Image (spheres, helix red, strand yellow):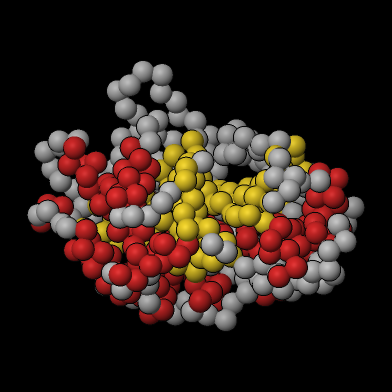
Amino acid sequence: MNKAQRFPIDNAGQLFGSVTTARRRPRFLFIAVLTGDVNPAVLSRALEITIGRFPGFHVELKNGFFWHFLQTSDQKVRLEQEGLGPFESSDPQGPLLRIGYSGRKIILEMAHVLSDGYGGITFLKTLIIQYFILQGVNVPFTHGSLDTAETQRPEEYEDGYKKYSRRALRGIWRETGTYRLPSLSKEPGSSRKVTFLTGIMNTGDVLTKARQYRVSVTEYLAAVLIQSLCMLQKESKTEKRLPVKISVSADLRKFYSSVTLRNFSGFCNAGIDPGAGEYSFEEIVVEVHHQCRLMLSEKNLNALISRNIRDEKNILVQATPLFIKKPLAMLLLDFLASREATMDLTNMGQIELPEAIRDKVERFDTFGGNYRFFKIECGVISYQDKLCVCFSRTIDQPFVENRFFELLAAAGIRVTLE
């Protein structure tokens, strides 16, 4: 065994590491649904080859005196049979990367301390291509995958936040407390286990509807989510009508020439304040569109990440031992940051694969698992003519999903639920 190699954790990864506990580890899930059953022997060999190309993912989370760090793991990344029982592991020191299979599905589960959705989908694409190469298909490592014959490049594991941050400017928007969904309903037999639901739609149908309002697919779906949440808050008959906001993610690689496989994402909290009066759907769409276009710009996102880097470089923060940083981070997150949005929405966009295997994959799903941040999360991902909206939740009733898909159906978009 070679000497263990250390990898620094990026700015966002340090936060995710600080809120990792025995009960919760921020993570996410990707599922590739093939057109035929998975061959486990071939997939296991493909995994062994692929992980060699991503040594920065074959690591364990370690506690230093002041900060967390990643260190090469001496445990082999093994293919797990059947479902992974996603997000239910109680071991905070367990694998940061898990790969499983079930029927036609290849399942990737990754801790957020390791990477964001870009890194996860890059690994999954590479694994899928390697899998089909071993089955004799002549397919190149293109469309966002990495050639397994190459070695890692230093820039793939750089901290993009530190590299591209400039000045910690004051934010242009003021964050307020928002409406939060209750964790449990009054119905008996409730459960806090994670529940998943995917709505499968035609990509063209959703795109056409978004174009009718002259907005992006992300903005349109965020507006439908906000309308759903506003209706639920109104039905709850609470005395005070709180703002409803969706935390919309943005890939910072679109603004900078970065190929990092670490976390490198920003966000904005877009929404409305029902206390100002009743909003029509058209008004919600306009609000979300203009807020996203304003806040998800390079200048404003850079101000956001620069403030985070400033906080990390603060002398007091650097001198505080990790055993004190960790509970403080949880406290701040629980009482401040996690209250600034009702839930989140992450759109991974259109996934592309080489033509040689394009028809061998039916669709992709994506689920979030940051339940210290949000009790319910929404992921969006497209592949060819299928757009999947994927909900994961720890609240016991599907209030949000049901209302969301009802509104889409009423708008003329056909939805198949799984």
The foreground one among 102 and 65 is: 102
**With respect to residue 254, does 343 lie above or below?**
above
Q: Is residue 357 left or right of residue 116?
A: right
Relative image position of residue 347 (x, y in whole percent): 47, 61
Which residue is found at the position 51% from the left and 41% from the top?
418
Relative image position of residue 160 (x, y in whole percent): 56, 72
Q: Is residue 181 left or right of residue 345?
A: left
Number of on-image labels: 0
Query: On the image, which quarter does residue 301 sit in?
Result: bottom left
The foreground one among 335 and 191 is: 191
**With respect to residue 191, does 264 lie above or below?**
below
Task: In the displayed orientation, state which residue is furthest to the right.
Answer: 1
The foreground one among 75 and 193 is: 193
Query: On the image, which quarter does residue 363 sit in?
Result: bottom right
Relative image position of residue 285 (x, y in whole percent): 26, 64
**With respect to residue 232, does 71 lie above or below?**
below
Relative image position of residue 328 (x, y in whole percent): 42, 47
Q: Using the rendered image of the protein, determine whether residue 264 is visible from the camera's viewpoint.
A: yes
Which residue is found at the position 30% from the left and 23% from the top?
186
Q: Using the rendered image of the protein, determine whether residue 96 is visible from the camera's viewpoint.
A: no
Task: In the displayed orientation, state which residue is furthest to the top.
Answer: 188
**With respect to residue 305, does 380 lie above or below?**
above
Which residue is found at the position 80% from the left and 57% from the top?
131
Which residue is found at the position 38% from the left and 43% from the top?
401
